[in-house]
Amino acid sequence: MAQVQQQAIEFPFRTEGGGAVIEAPRHLLAALRRSAVSTDQPKGLVLLSGPSSVYRLGLCAAVDRALAGEPVLYLAGANVFDPFLVGRLARASRVAPAHVLQQIHVSRAFTCHQMVRLVTECLPSALRTYDARFVILAGPLDTLYDQSVPEAEAMRLIRAMMEALQHMAEQAIQVLCVSPLAPPESGGRSRFVAALRAQARRVIDLCEAEDGLWLQEEGGPEPRRWMIPRPLWNRL
C-alpha cells in the first residue's frame, strides 16, 4: 500500500498520527484551496465522493473561489444548495454574503434529461457568459438513478455527460464533481460512480468518524489524507 502523504500546509495542530487538522472556518477554506480539493488547478475533473456530507464540502469549495473573486457555476442535480451556509462562511471571512452569492451562479435540474442538458448544452455558453473556469456538479448522477428511466436511456445520458466533461477538461476547465455513494436501489447503475472515478484526474473519498471527517485523495503524485474535526464541521 502506498504511503499516505500528509498535507504540506501549516495547520494549527495535527493528530498523533500526523494527520492534518483544520480547526476554524477560515482555515478550512484556505486548506481547500491548497489541498486535494484545490480549486486552483489548471484543468480536469476532480471527484469528491462519500456520504451526503460531500455536498456541504463542495459548497465550501465554491465559497472559497467566490471569495477569491472568481465566478463559480454550480449545477445541482440534487436540491442541496444552501445559501445560509454560504452566508455563514462569508461572514466568517468578513465579506458580505450578498457579494459571495453574486459570484455563484446556480442552475438546478429535477430530471436526468435536464441535468444532462445543463452539462452538454447550457454549460458551455454559461462559461463564456460569466467568463468562468470553475464548475461544481453537485449530485450529477442522482437523477440518473430514477428507475422510471429505462436502462438504455440512462446509459445514453451518462455517456453524453462524460463526453462533455472530457471536452471541458481539454479546454482547461476545472470541474469538481460532488457525488455521494450510489443508493441501494440504484441496482446496476451504481457503476456510474465507477465511470466518474475512472475519468477523474483526482479522486477524494470522504469518510465520517466520531472525531470528524476524514478525506483521502487518490491520483496525483501520491495519496494524501487529512481531517476536519467534528466540532468545526458541526458549526458550519
Image: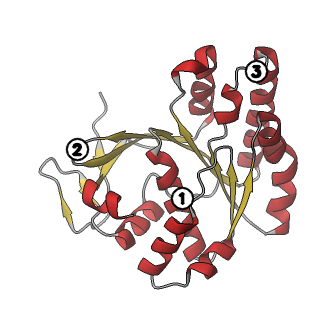
Query: Does label 2 or label 3 sit earlier along the sequence?
Result: 3
Element carrying mark 1: helix
Q: Which residue is mark 1?
A: 59
Element carrying mark 3: loop
Is residue 68 left or right of 217 when viewed as pictured? right
Is residue 128 left or right of 35 when viewed as pictured? right
Q: Residues within 10 Å of mark 3 (few under 14, many from 20)?
A: few
Amino acid type assigned to the residue bearing label 3 in the image = Ser
Element carrying mark 2: loop
Q: Residue at x 44, y 62 (%)?
A: 34
Q: Residue at x 62, y 42 (%)?
A: 139
Nearest-to-viewer mark from 1 and 3: 3
Quarter placement of the C terminus: bottom left
Q: Which residue is mark 3?
A: 148
Q: Nearer the viewer, residue 85 or 201?
A: 85
Tell me: residue 124, above or below residue 69: above
Q: Residue at x 57, y 19 (%)?
A: 185
Tell me: residue 204, above or below residue 235: above
Amino acid type assigned to the residue bearing label 2 in the image = Glu
